[in-house]
Image: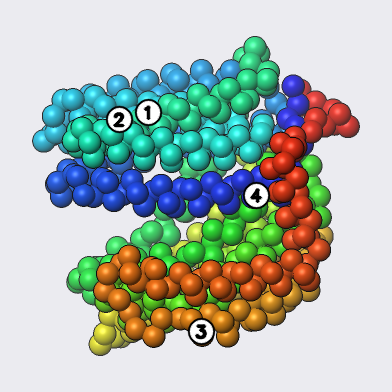
Amino acid sequence: MKPPRVRLRYVGLLSLVASIVAVGCGALFSLIVSRRLQPWELGEWRYISSVFTYFLIPLNILNFWTVRYVSRGFQVYSTVVLTGLLVGVFASVSFHALSPLLVDRLEHTVIVVASLQLFTMFVAGCIDSLALGFKPQVAQYGSMSFEIVKTVMAYFLILLLRMRLVGAFISVAFAFAVKAFIEFLMIRDAEWKRFNPGFLKDVIRLSWLPLYSTFVSSLASLDVIVITAILGETVSIGFWTAAFTIGNLPSIALSLSAGLYPHLLREVKVKDVELSTRLVYMLSTPITLGIILIAEPLLNILRPEYATVWVASSILAVNSYLLGISSISSTSLMGSEDIELRDKAFKSYLGSVLFKLPSLNLARFTTYLVILVVFFSTFKPDTVSATITLWAIIRLLVNLPFSLYVAYWSARRLKWSLPFKQMGKYLILSLFMVPPVLLVKPRSLSVQAVNALLELAPSILLGASVYLSLLYVFDREFRSLVSGVLRFLKTYYLVYAPRDDRKPYG
């Protein structure tokens, strides 16, 4: 059975809802875990989660190619699930066997449930990649179910039954199992009978590409280690984390482009890239401006002393806004590449987007890290806020040329252009929310987090209301989007339609 057509607006809106649910449930789960687990238990839990990253490398390789093959109509469903189950069992048994070397101070029960969680991560990961390629909206339903079930289970097992570390692992494992079950039910109409050994050969033969990409991505997190080593303290890292948490909020708008990648793998259309860009900047523009206006009270909610790095948060918000262009352009480049369908030669892959794009990111991350080392080795700011602000400026200045180049590369390859007219309109409409936001913005900062949030809420709600009202009046696409949502809520309109005009892949 060939994959059904992707409805970009629906998948994007559903992904946005899933992201909001993830933020809310994730905060509750973290609160439960942080309050009930002893500091050493919380540390062990975080440590084991980090160790899992290395055991999950085979899953990441499998998932990378699964999404690309399934989106193009290849019948690899049974192959992926069986492979995931076998590798999951091997990884879980290996973790259990190596646990005396990795985590020697934990009880055997904790090791068992941790091994169980690792196995469910493999199962859920395989089915999730199939869902992303076959019906992307299913992955969003699965994501929401995972966050909700995880939080509910944590409430009963950790908060009420006080199972502590065991309860934490069981909660996550059960949530992954539920996620896998729900997604499997929703894609059960796929072709599950055929086993495709050729797909496994391709995954193994081409495993170096996702491994290379994973290695490059890991470099992005080295900045924290570099700054810690140079400054010899970790206080700045805490302030950086707070500034980044607030400054990265515009990136939530990228969830509106969740359906673009599998859609482009099916069929490359310029109008779909432009549509995703408009949807993303329809939301990221007011969020970015809003953060610049109220960064200080937002940081105060996290912790009063973090309010001093509001300038850095504002800079990081602009950086996040800019990376939206880079993210959509990168997605369009990856989605338009079909080298695996045309050529098997190793040299050909070196000239493909699948290799060139990670190589470009390698240059970007390397430049970023080198500048950090040189700058902070020769210049030590007097205050934490100055350190974080300069760090944010360096990050923005490095990302700027690389983001613009990726956008140029994508535009040249796919023959599309950024919707500057619409982006300008979103910016102008966002400016109208500045006066009301500043009018009701808190004049003083409360120490209590709940009070600080309640005092800031009117400013956020008023600004959002002004922007959305103006957007509804002046933007036809937003009116169409609202009408579609209302129609769906009223009639449960089926937003995925079969693609009878496409020939199935072999």
The disc label shown at residue 174, or none: 1
Q: Which residue is mark 4?
A: 12
x, y percentage for residue 130? 59, 30
Q: Is residue 383 above or below residue 73?
A: below
- Is residue 395 left or right of 465 when viewed as pictured? left
Amino acid carrying mark 3 in the image: Leu
Q: Quadrant of the N terminus?
A: top right
Q: What SS does tag 3 mark?
A: helix
Residue under the point 75% across and 49% down: 484
Q: Which residue is mark 2?
A: 170
Q: CA distance from mark 3 to mark 1?
A: 45 Å
For mark 1, does the 10 Å Cα neighbourhood hold few (<14), some (14 to 19), or many (20 or more) residues?
some
Q: Quadrant of the C terminus?
A: top right
* Labelled pair 2, 1 in contact (Cβ < 8 Å): yes
Residue under the point 65% across and 61% down: 280
Q: Is residue 277 above or below residue 344?
A: below
Disc 4 or 1, which lies upstream in sequence?
A: 4
For mark 2, does the 10 Å Cα neighbourhood hold few (<14), some (14 to 19), or many (20 or more) residues?
many
Q: Which residue is mark 3?
A: 438
Q: Quadrant of residue 146?
A: top left
Q: What SS does tag 4 mark?
A: helix
Q: CA distance from mark 3 to mark 2?
A: 46 Å
